Amino acid sequence: MFRQVAHRLLTRSTTTTYPIFPATTTLRSFSTEVSTDASSGDSAFIDAWKKVAPNIDPPKTPSQYMEPRPPTPSTLPSKLTVNFVLPYAAELSKAEVDMVIVPATTGQMGILPGHVPTIAELKPGLLSVHEGNDVKKYFISSGFAFVHSNSYADILAVEAVPLDRIDPAQVQKGLSEFTQKLNSASSDLDKAEAQIGVDVHSALNSALTG
């Protein structure tokens, strides 16, 4: 219920005007409200291209390589569709799950079907994917989570490792080493590098023991 109310509050008319702006000023739509049909924009581009360079074939636009965006459903879906992508692999592609919990910089954030559109920056921490009684856990280094109004979530991480592949002894060793480096650091650069090591290994330790 809260998610549905919040979504209605966030829904904006593209013709709304405000007295502090000129009468012709309008609000832009959310990216998830933009039509999935890009043919009209491509046609306008092609027509303009032919006027300028009629003897050269027009280049393809990015929208021609994209799959159409699924529309926003009229009822609350029972599943959340998740894409979890790394620079070198796709851990999840269009996986339908019950919930995802991501380590946002503002704290652990749960994403359920019908979540309001959100962009969240991610910090080192535990990401968990819940489907029934099955829970997959990953430790991620950083990234972003994009939650769309159609109950799709795109999670982009720089690095991610399944939690069961992390050696707790190595985590404790790294935490001890970086703590010593932080205590003995003499320059601001050394302190910053050591602090990053302490923060990451502390997050690793919390993910393993939490």
Image (cartoon, rainbow, N blue to C red):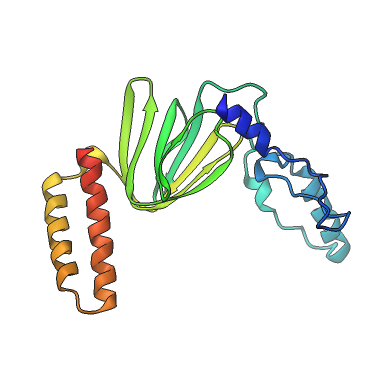
Q: Is residue 131 above or below residue 28?
A: above
Residue 135 x %, y % = 32, 28
Q: Quadrant of the C terminus?
A: top left
Q: Nearer the viewer, residue 120 or 66?
A: 120
Q: Residue furthest front?
A: 19
Q: Is residue 59 visible?
A: yes
Residue at figure coordinates x 24%, y 61% from the top left: 197
Q: Is residue 116 left or right of residue 210?
A: right
Q: Is residue 150 left or right of residue 83?
A: right
Q: Nearer the viewer, residue 126 or 62?
A: 126
Q: Is residue 70 visible?
A: no
Residue at figure coordinates x 81%, y 51% from the top left: 18
**Label total for image:** 0
Q: Is residue 68 left or right of residue 46?
A: left
Q: Is residue 1 left or right of residue 198?
A: right
Q: Residue furthest bottom?
A: 187
Residue 153 x %, y % = 51, 38
Q: Nearer the viewer, residue 25 or 89?
A: 25
Q: Image quadrant of residue 20?
A: bottom right
Residue 173 x %, y % = 11, 55
Residue at figure coordinates x 24%, y 79% from the top left: 187
Residue at figure coordinates x 32%, y 24% from the top left: 134
Q: Nearer the viewer, residue 164 or 109?
A: 109
Q: Quadrant of the N terminus?
A: top right
Residue 163 x %, y % = 25, 40
Q: Is residue 189 above or below residue 28?
A: below
